[in-house]
Image (cartoon, helix red, strand yellow):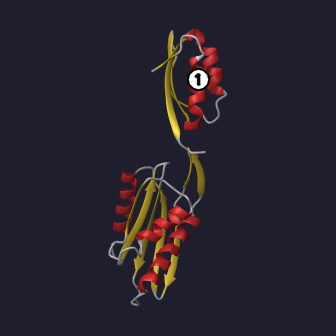
Amino acid sequence: MADTYYTIDSVGEGVYREKMSKFMAFAVPVSTATEAREVIATYTNRYHDARHVCWAYMVGAARTEYLSSDNGEPSGTAGKPILGQINSFNLTNVVVIVVRYFGGIKLGTSGLIVAYREAAREAITASHIIECHEQAEVSFTFPYLAMEPVMRLVKNTDGLKVLDQQFDNSCSMRVQLRADHEPEFRRRLADISGLTFS
């Protein structure tokens, strides 16, 4: 389904060592690019003594918003391999940060690519991958007399969450549900007498 995407629900950590260099990796769940940048800033400050703090993130169910950084490593040797791992696990709403402590021996371009890729993979596999669904919100008002059919429909719609509700002579509700269930839910609501979408 187009609205299904995969992310992680916990922080995963991994370590990769190569020729005395130590690569510490962290996979962190985020929901926006702003949040991803805040996480990157936190880890950059925490590991300010490291030679490089490289990263990549991807956000959004469509997986079209992403960015990566080599943070001083040769171009394409760090950020790209990290982003490649996010892609190979088909993830989004995630930032992966790899902190490198230089061990004194140069790894060369191919060695760096392998190290950053493997460190990122370690962190992702250590986290818990979950399936999520893009959500949609629907707001509507209805007369008190229509309460019974409305509540029946709300109760029988899988994964629906009531965000706000007010019951009076005129009642209103705001609900959240899977985006691919929205058209059918709206169609069934429209059949209820006196109901209007707000």
- The residue lying at 36 percent from left, 52 percent from top is 34
Q: Quadrant of residue 162?
A: top right
From the viewer's side, name the closer residue of 31 and 50.
31
Name the residue tied to disc 1: 187
Determine whether, in the image, residue 107 is placed left or right of residue 14: left
Tell me which amino acid carries mark 1: Arg
In what quadrant of the picture does the C terminus appear? top left
- The residue lying at 41 percent from left, 50 percent from top is 32
- The residue lying at 43 percent from left, 60 percent from top is 57
Tag 1 secondary structure: helix
In what quadrant of the picture does the N terminus appear? top right
Against 190, is 124 above or below? Answer: below
Determine whether, in the image, residue 69 is placed left or right of residue 133: left
Residue 108: x percent and y percent? 42, 86
- The residue lying at 39 percent from left, 70 percent from top is 54
Residue 107: x percent and y percent? 43, 86
Q: Residues within 10 Å of mark 1 (few under 14, many from 20)?
A: few
Residue 106: x percent and y percent? 40, 88
Against 145, is 136 above or below? Answer: below
From the viewer's side, name the closer residue of 76 and 100.
76
So how many labels did they put on this image? 1
Against 143, is 27 above or below? Answer: below
Against 104, is 46 above or below? Answer: above
Residue 169: x percent and y percent? 51, 9
